Image (cartoon, grey):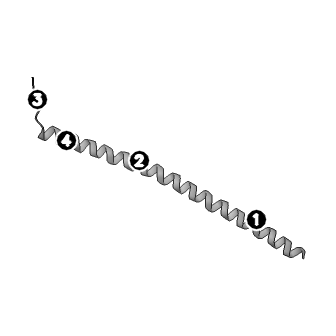
Amino acid sequence: MIPLIAGIGISTALWTVRAITISGTAGMSYATGRKFGRNACNLLDSFEDKARSIVSNAFVPEIEE
């Protein structure tokens, strides 16, 4: 009877550790993905701004008063 109770206790503890490990990994992966995604978005926005300024300066004449 005691080995059965000990086995259930150890099994529960191992499943708990596994669940916490998987949850922590998923949380860190989500945060890292958001960080890199935000950096990529900012980089692409800067490329877009540079391209827009090049095109607007090349094709739109300046108005002199």
Q: Which residue is mark 2?
A: 39
Contact (Cβ within 8 Å) of mark 2 with mark 4:
no
Image position of 34 (left or right of 8): left
Q: Earlier in the sequence, mark 2 or mark 1?
A: 1
Contact (Cβ within 8 Å) of mark 4 with mark 1:
no
Report x, y in % for residue 59. 12, 41
- Look at the image and tell me in which quarter the N terminus lies: bottom right
Judge the density around disc 1: few (<14), some (14-19), many (≥20) Cα neighbours within 10 Å.
few
Distance Cα–Cα, label 2 vs label 1: 39 Å
* Tag 1: amino acid: Ala
- Look at the image and tell me in which quarter the C terminus lies: top left
Distance Cα–Cα, label 2 vs label 4: 23 Å
Q: How many marks?
A: 4
* Tag 2: amino acid: Asn
Image quadrant assignment for residue 4: bottom right
Q: Earlier in the sequence, mark 4 or mark 1?
A: 1
Q: Which residue is mark 3?
A: 63
Q: Earlier in the sequence, mark 3 or mark 4?
A: 4
Q: Describe the element under mark 3 as helix, strand or loop.
A: loop
Report x, y in % for residue 52. 22, 43
Distance Cα–Cα, label 3 vs label 4: 17 Å
Image quadrant assignment for residue 10: bottom right
Q: Which residue is mark 4?
A: 54
Image position of 47 (left or right of 27): left
* Tag 4: amino acid: Ile
Contact (Cβ within 8 Å) of mark 1 with mark 3:
no
Q: Which residue is mark 1?
A: 13
